[in-house]
Amino acid sequence: MNIAVRAILFLTLLLAGCATPRIVVLSDPLDARERNDLGASYESAGELDLALQAYAEAADKDPSWDQPLINLGNVHAARGQWPEAEGAYRKALRRNNANPEAMNNLAYSLARQRRTAEALEWSGTALALDSGNPLFMSTRALGLLQSGRRDEAVALLDQALSALPAGDPLRQEAAALRDRALRAAPGESVDMWP
């Protein structure tokens, strides 16, 4: 009997240690907008890897929404990863082909890659959709400078500067770009980056 009790006890312990396998499905409680907001929080905290992940997840959660892809491109741009930024902006434009922010940011990333003709096309379209936007004017002026169109760039930068309030950080950048443009000879291509 002692052996029987030991056998039953052994089997009980053995079965207790081998629980029935279960499949656990984890789901993300955050929707696309909340996930995008999380990405923005990570980005503002300087956690760019986490921001990239959150924006990509937000874009996957809502395949019709373009803003997470723009944000994804902006993080790549902040890292100087211009081809990756370009790819994200192009994906955003496939989702919403009338988004001037995506167009402008794509134009800037193309200018950073010295693809001036295409940058001018996109910046022109963005500016046509939002003609009073000083950021779009500055991006267009940058492309114009790269293509040697100094006078057009200066006129556009003057317009941008008149629209920007004194404390806006873009004002300093636009003023510096205008000064650089004025030092260039007419027709001289001005490249802003080494």
Image (spheres, rainbow, N blue to C red):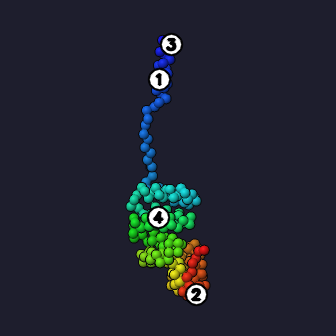
Mark 1 or mark 2, earlier in chain: 1
Labelled pair 1, 3 in contact (Cβ < 8 Å): no
SS of the residue under disc 3: helix
Measure the alpha-carbon separation of dots 4 and 2: 35 Å
Labelled pair 1, 2 in contact (Cβ < 8 Å): no
Mark 2 or mark 3, earlier in chain: 3
Mark 1 or mark 3, earlier in chain: 3
Q: Split into 4 quadrants, where in the image is the C terminus?
A: bottom right
Vertical comparison of 18 with 183: above or below: above
Q: Residues within 10 Å of mark 3 (few under 14, many from 20)?
A: few
Mark 4 or mark 2, earlier in chain: 4
Amino acid marked by disc 3: Asn
Amino acid marked by disc 1: Thr
Where is residue 99? Give x, y as percent: 42, 69
Residue hosting label 2: 185
Farthest residue toward the bottom?
A: 186
Q: Is residue 94 left or right of residue 155?
A: left
Q: Residues within 10 Å of mark 2 (few under 14, many from 20)?
A: few
Q: Is residue 141 left or right of residue 128?
A: right
Residue hosting label 4: 88
Measure the alpha-carbon separation of dots 1 and 3: 15 Å
Residue hosting label 1: 12
Mark 3 or mark 4, earlier in chain: 3
Measure the alpha-carbon separation of dots 1 and 2: 90 Å
Callout count: 4
Amino acid marked by disc 4: Ala
Where is residue 189? Give x, y as percent: 55, 82
For residue 79, say whether it is visible.
Answer: yes
Residue hosting label 3: 2
